[in-house]
Image (cartoon, rainbow, N blue to C red):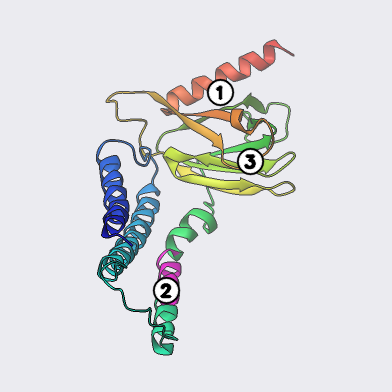
Amino acid sequence: MSRLWSLLFLAVPVVGVWICIWSANNGYWLPDDISSHGHTIDHLFNFCLWLTGAVFVVTELVMVWFMWKYDAKAHAEPVKYTHGSHNLEIVWTIVPAATLLFIAIYQMNAWANVKMRVPKDPDVEVEVVARQFEWRIRYPGKDGVFNTRDDLHSVNDLHVPVGEQILVRLKSQDVLHDFFLPHLRIKQDAVPGMVIPVWFKAERISNVTGATSANYDLVCAELCGWGHYKMKGQLTVETRDEYERFLANLEQQQEATQ
């Protein structure tokens, strides 16, 4: 094999790493984090990225070195075969296994905070029902109880007050969906027949000083049918006063149609 191919192969990790670094420094990376737990999720993501990235670079460099050193034109002698080393096989089996075990233990507390430790006294409770192809959202009325006459309903428009603990009761009416709030680092499957608690706190509204509200993406991250691409909603993070006005307007709209 010509050594030119080894240089072309070397371009793969070089260009790949450059694109990764350039993207991170030019705004083409993770969406802005506004949640209370997002820094933990991002830290785990970056840790795994750097770990696997380092393994990728080292592996590619070793392959390039072998391609360069054992170029066919420079080595005309017949190929020599080996059955390998059992000790080496044991090492490269144990090292990845130990690494995966370390990652599993390292992320346990983050997993528990996001998926297991349900808040006992949330500031706001809301029900989100996924269906093909929309998000149906229900807020408890003035009585603070779901499934009563004063419940407030909206479609694809989720509002939450900033700085407060939000508890979402997530359901699916038909097939498997995925409740995804990228700016809050929330991603949870909505499973038919199950009520799944999802909780988060938006620590700030946006990067704009003095802003009273900001809109963020609410999307389905699970292929749920032909209309999956259009199953998009909106999350509005706002002040408590703006949130109360939203609920009051929603109540007036519903009363006008009864």
- The three-letter code of the residue at mark 3 reads Leu
- Res. 223 mark: 3
- Looking at the image, residue 194 sits to the left or right of residue 206; the answer is right
Q: Residue at x 68, y 10 (%)?
A: 256
Q: Which residue is mark 1?
A: 247
- The three-letter code of the residue at mark 1 reads Leu
Residue 43 in which image quadrant: bottom left
Q: Residues within 10 Å of mark 3 (few under 14, many from 20)?
A: few
Q: Position of residue 29 (x, y in %)?
A: 34, 41
Looking at the image, which is closer to me, 228 or 249?
228
Q: Quadrant of the C terminus?
A: top right
Cα separation between marks 3 and 1: 32 Å
Is residue 104 within the magenta segment? yes
Name of the residue lying farthest toward the top:
256
Task: Please identify, in this view, whether the residue under mark 1 or under mark 2 is nearer the observer.
Answer: 2
Residue 9 in which image quadrant: bottom left
Q: Is residue 86 above or below residue 35?
A: below
Q: Are marks 3 and 2 in contact (CB under 8 Å)?
A: no
Q: Quadrant of the N terminus?
A: bottom left
Task: Please identify, in this view, whether the residue under mark 3 or under mark 1 is nearer the observer.
Answer: 3
Looking at the image, which is closer to me, 145 or 166?
166
Is residue 126 within the magenta segment? no
Q: Position of residue 36 (x, y in %)?
A: 38, 46
- Looking at the image, residue 165 sits to the left or right of residue 224; the answer is left
Q: Residue at x 40, y 24 (%)?
A: 213
Q: Are marks 1 and 2 in contact (CB under 8 Å)?
A: no
Looking at the image, which is closer to me, 210 or 194?
194
- The three-letter code of the residue at mark 2 reads Pro
Q: Which residue is mark 2?
A: 96
Q: Residue at x 50, y 24 (%)?
A: 244
Label 3, secondary structure: give it.
Answer: loop
